[in-house]
Amino acid sequence: MTRTDTITLGGVEITRVFEERRFDMPRLAIFPDVDEAIWRRQRDWLDPGFWNADSDMLVASLQSWLLRSDGATILVDTGVGNDKPRPGMPIFDGLQTGYLDNLAAAGTRPEDVDLVVITHLHSDHVGWNTRLVDGEWVPTFPNARYLFARDDLEYWDPGNGHPTRSGERMAGVFEDSVAPVLAAGLVDSWEGRHQADTNLSLEPAPGHTPGSAVLWLRSGTDRAAFVGDLLHSPLQVAEPDVCPCFDEDEAQGLASRRRVLGSVADEGALLLPAHFPSAGAVELRRDGDRFAITEWAAFA
């Protein structure tokens, strides 16, 4: 389905570009160590939009955020990609979608993108960094600079031999979706904090991966946080201590999640995770030592 959703915050236009509008995965494939009773406590609002209790499937989306800020066209995360061999993640293996058609429906050709911001280097966030042309992986966005956290570049480079929790799930990802843009000289790595433009800044939120980051939008009185995989399900707003098996360091990921959710609540920001379906983004408030959703975003 070719469809986009757009809102404006301050001087920044935000469009959601889908790779897959609905993408279901078994709950136990993501949260195998989380007691089902925790999910059932929240069933009245999770089921069926975010978790189908009868089938025990999570409802998610695969999507990018397309921003227009300071005259630039910026893409936040690039999904799974087409033709990518992912034997360690069969659900992504050889995926074929109309992502570039959806990007075109948002008025953007690959050559129009000025900046690609990657929140972390997992397979479903870097895939469209490249595409297959005559048997070679080439940068999809040839005129863009690609922003990668230095910690993630170092950690996921197979030449560095780091043992990882993800293991075979990340087989081939660096080689086909990161190395080609490095070889093309299109990458800017960053550490600490990075100001992307007058409205947008990157801040570390490690745990899911060592270089996981939040892209903060602060424009006029409006605030938003693009948090990547800091959350995989809205359940983690009400139950922030719930961790997915994809976190390289669960304790660090939990601390980052609580810190960022606290900042989102305190600043009255819009929270934009990578995989929330339906409205896709939320406003929230503190609720004791947890958080509660106050309003869903205005995306269709």
Image (cartoon, rainbow, N blue to C red):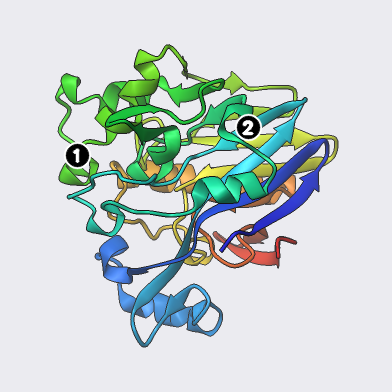
Which residue is nearer to you in this view: 76 or 209? 76
- Label 2: state its secondary structure: strand
Q: Quarter of the image holding residue 90?
A: bottom left
Where residue 282 is drawn, which disc sits there?
none
Q: Which residue is drawn at the image coordinates 39% and 84% (left, top)?
A: 53
Q: Residue at x 25, y 65 (%)?
A: 32
Instruction: Look at label 2 and name its amino acid.
Output: Ile
Q: Which mark is residue 171?
A: 1
**Crowd rating for badge 2 (residues with CA inside 10 Å; few <14, some 14–19, many 20+):** many
> Which residue type carries mark 1?
Ala
Badge 1 or badge 2: first in the primary sequence: 2
Residue 117 in view, yes or no: yes
Total labels: the figure holds 2
User: Is residue 137 shown left or right of residue 73?
Assistant: left
Residue at position x 41%, y 82% from top?
A: 40
Q: Is residue 22 above or below residue 155?
A: below
Residue closest to the eye, 105 or 77? 105
Q: Position of residue 114 (x, y in %)?
A: 62, 24
Q: Quadrant of the N terminus?
A: bottom right
Of all residues shown, which one is farthest toward the top?
185
Disc ID at residue 74: 2
User: Residue 209: horizontal and vertical position, in percent?
Assistant: 35, 37
